[in-house]
Amino acid sequence: MDRYADTDLTRQTLSIVIPVYNEARTLRALIERVLRAPLPMERELIVVDDGSTDDSQAIIMSMAAEDDRIRPVCHEHNQGKGAAIRTALEHVTGDWIIIQDADLEYDPQEYTILLEPVRTGLADAVFGSRFLVGKYTRVLFFWHKALNNALTLITNIPVSYTHLTLPTKRIV
């Protein structure tokens, strides 16, 4: 676990994986924020367009032509976020990896906070959550979490308690 403990990050590279599907509205701003985020290390952005039907791919290619830290990868058709991440991981060359959604939900300014437990040897991996209380909290997320919990509860009620009958299939 202490493989990177007190590592000098200035000699490391952070690979920032950005899966994209129809994010033309926020993509340019997100990439600019990621490039400006304060980091004590080099960075590379692996931006995977997952078959977008809007201008996302053109934006990625344009920005990659202007900045060699941006490495574009394109899927011909939509394969899902998981496939976009797996594709990106094939292109990663950095010592560290962060997965950044392209919808501006997560703030690139918090990368150093995410990296700290790993850098100091306190963790092997760090997973962020929009629901955990951290340094900042938004009231909006209370209702988001409450509704998610209610939907989860409803969908987890066993069918036998709801008096519903489900069609059965006989296997011969």
Image (cartoon, grey):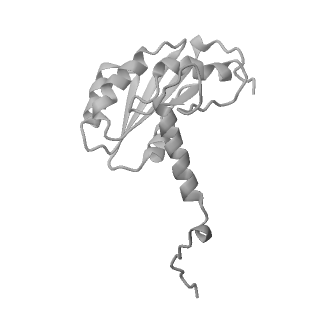
Q: Could you say where residue 161 lies in the image, as x and y percent from the top left?
A: 61, 68
Residue 84 visible in the snapshot: yes
Q: How many marks?
A: 0
Give whichever of 109, 32 is nearer the camera.
Answer: 109
Give whichever of 92, 21 is nearer the camera.
Answer: 21
Quarter of the C terminus within the rendering:
bottom right
Q: Is residue 47 above or below residue 148?
A: above
Quarter of the N terminus within the rendering:
top right
Q: Quadrant of residue 10?
A: top right
* Residue at 60% across, 21% down: 115
Side of 20 relative to 12 (left or right): left
Q: Could you say where residue 129 lies in the image, as x and y percent from the top left?
A: 56, 33
* Residue at 60% across, 14% down: 9
What is the residue that sits farthest to the bottom in this orientation? 172
Residue 90 visible in the snapshot: no
Q: Could you say where residue 62 lies in the image, as x and y percent from the top left?
A: 26, 26
* Residue at 59% across, 58% down: 156
Q: Is residue 109 above or below residue 71?
A: above
Q: Quadrant of residue 55?
A: top left
Give whichever of 71, 129 is nearer the camera.
Answer: 129
Give whichever of 39, 73 is nearer the camera.
Answer: 39
Q: Could you say where residue 76 lies in the image, as x and y percent from the top left?
A: 32, 48
Side of 93 relative to 122 (left or right): left
